[in-house]
Amino acid sequence: EYGERTGVIFTADHGEQFREHGQLGHTASLFEEEVHVPGWVDAPEGLLSAEEKANLEARREHPTFHTDVTPTILDLMGLWDAPEIADYRREMPGESWLRRPGELRPLLFTNCSGVWGCAFQNWGVVKGTRKLIAREWDADWLCFDVATDPFEKNDLGAEACADLRTIAETSFGGMPGAK
């Protein structure tokens, strides 16, 4: 047991594929098996206001991302609204889980970064429950609604995510592997 004013955030790093999409391990795709991880806040009674509890509960129906962890930690510490971090807060792509979910906006994601190289390029955009992804060996973008198809078995076709495709191709410069 921990202190009466201590909130704990549980999450994980990444998932693993065990041949669900013909692949094994992680970093070879952006399918849910690799990117969907558990996450929740454990807070003792009295730490969160009724509004914060309601906002946290609303997140069950609103996709959340690891980019939300830092704002949530800062909010749990009472620092999210501190003027001293206003410039940093504006640059953070996430939002605190303790606040009312904001407007759904597209979030770019990839397995490639300046810190970790990538053996295979995988790019995607997610907005709400719609997700557009591609690996460098895919012929076209794949579009899924992870709310109705959590195992991503039914590709809706790139046109079903046309708005996300425009964002992806503008941001990444085309399909993975094209550069």
Image: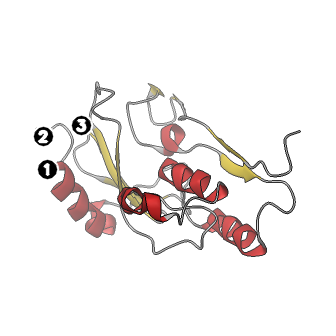
Labels 2 and 3: the sequence-earlier one: 3
Image quadrant in which the C terminus is located: top left
Label 3, on which residue? 136
Specify whether residue 59 is in view.
Answer: yes
Q: Is residue 143 visible?
A: no
Q: Quadrant of the N terminus?
A: top right
In primary-sequence order, the first of circles 3 and 1 is 3
Quote the CA–CA distance across marks 2 and 1. Answer: 8 Å
Q: Image quadrant of residue 76?
A: bottom right
Q: Which mark is residue 178?
A: 2
- The percent position of residue 13, horizontal first and vertical second, equals 55, 34
Q: Determine which residue is flagged by label 1.
A: 173
Ranked by sequence position, the earlier of labels 2 and 1 is 1
Left or right? Give the position of 144 relative to 150.
left
Name the residue type under label 1.
Gly
Q: Amino acid at mark 3?
A: Glu
